[in-house]
Amino acid sequence: MSVDEIAGDFSVTKVIGALHPPIDKTISEIKEYMSHTGYIPIFTTEGKRHVVQLGKFRKVEDRPKYWLNLLLFVATIITTILGYYLWFGGDLLSSVMFSFSLLTILTCHEFGHYIVSKRQGMVTSLPYFIPVPGHFIGTFGAVIRMKSIVPSRGSLLKVGMAGPLSGFLVAVPITIIGIALSEVQIAPEGASYMRLGNSLLFHLLGKVIHPHVPQGADIFLHPMAFAGWLGFLVTSMNLIPIGQLDGGHVAYSLFLRKRRYVYIPIFAGIIALGFLWLGWFIWGFLAFFLARRDPVIQDSLTPLTNKEKIYAVLPLIVLILTFIPQPITVG
């Protein structure tokens, strides 16, 4: 997950009219000219008219505090190890394997955002991990701070999809190894235990790796498999096309402000899912506030290329494969 932070106030001068075609060339020439003035142009529309806003942003002090990123990362290693050890009663080795697997997925997710945003010429922080002592997984993930304007719709698409796809590509082999190491056991009668819901992909992997599960038995997940399951869950939740979630960025790059037309059915779906798992109510509450702000794109006039539109299908496929309607029940 990422958090956009624009360093300064905008909208000093606003010019409304029509840009000379070809628009992409005109935009490029205006950006080149304005680069010598200290002003930054933002290209949008109002109705059928083109709008150019000129403004100055406070310069970002690019003095990253790497010690803070490292401290939070080390703290998250400790909390994830302790969380698994205390909640699931495993040995230290199992807890370390869980922590290593989960943090590998989360780190690849965040560095997917980081590397692609840097390639797009954006000012972006390193990931800030969020340790949560006492929680059963020990973390609420990580965030990066995007401190500059997104150059184009294509840039927003690439940055938005880079994180989930990177995390997903790492989560798949971790999950496969974890399920292979998992044991099929008879479910304890009369005892309650946490039963994890299946995504489409996790279910298929379980069927392929353990094709014969006897009646009354279940697959008891190895720590790596549990980390992979969490990786799928985090990926799908971030790909919901709303607000400042990664899926929201992808949707905004495709539809701009028209993406809000899908908010009502999405919120209705989240509320309905909340009756299966209370966590969806919490996620829906957070998503509502995240939905109240649109990304700032410097050039929202130049449309996505056909190639970029094809790329946008990949996050949808991953969302379908990893989505878990009812993540946790007690069996």
Image: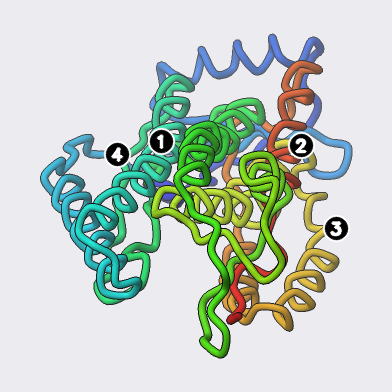
User: Which residue is painted at 67% across and 56% down in the image?
Assistant: 213
Q: Report, in whole angstroms, how far the alpha carbon at label 2 lies from the one at label 4.
A: 27 Å
What is the number of the mark on residue 254? 2
- In terms of sequence position, does the residue under pointer 1 or pointer 3 come before the other? 1
The answer to whether the residues at label 4 and label 3 have Cβ atoms under 8 Å apart is: no
Q: Residue 303 location, x and y as percent?
A: 77, 25
Q: Nearer the viewer, mark 4 or mark 1?
A: 1
Q: Report, in whole angstroms, how far the alpha carbon at label 4 lies from the one at label 1.
A: 12 Å
User: At label 3, which amino acid type do we have?
Assistant: Tyr
User: Which residue is painted at 34% across and 46% down in the image?
Assistant: 103
Q: Quadrant of residue 121?
A: top left
User: At label 2, which amino acid type do we have?
Assistant: Leu
Q: Residue 113 location, x and y as percent?
A: 46, 35
Q: Mark 2: give few (<14), some (14-19) or many (20+) Cα within 10 Å.
A: many
User: Which residue is painted at 79% across and 41% down in the image?
Assistant: 255
User: At label 1, which amino acid type do we have?
Assistant: Cys
Q: Report, in whole angstroms, how far the alpha carbon at label 4 lies from the one at label 3.
A: 33 Å
Viewer can see residue 137: yes
Q: Which residue is mark 1?
A: 108
User: At label 4, which amino acid type do we have?
Assistant: Leu
Image quadrant containing the C terminus: bottom right
- In terms of sequence position, does the residue under pointer 1 or pointer 2 come before the other? 1
What is the number of the mark on residue 126? 4
- In terms of sequence position, does the residue under pointer 2 or pointer 4 come before the other? 4
Question: Helix, strand, or loop for circle 2?
Answer: helix
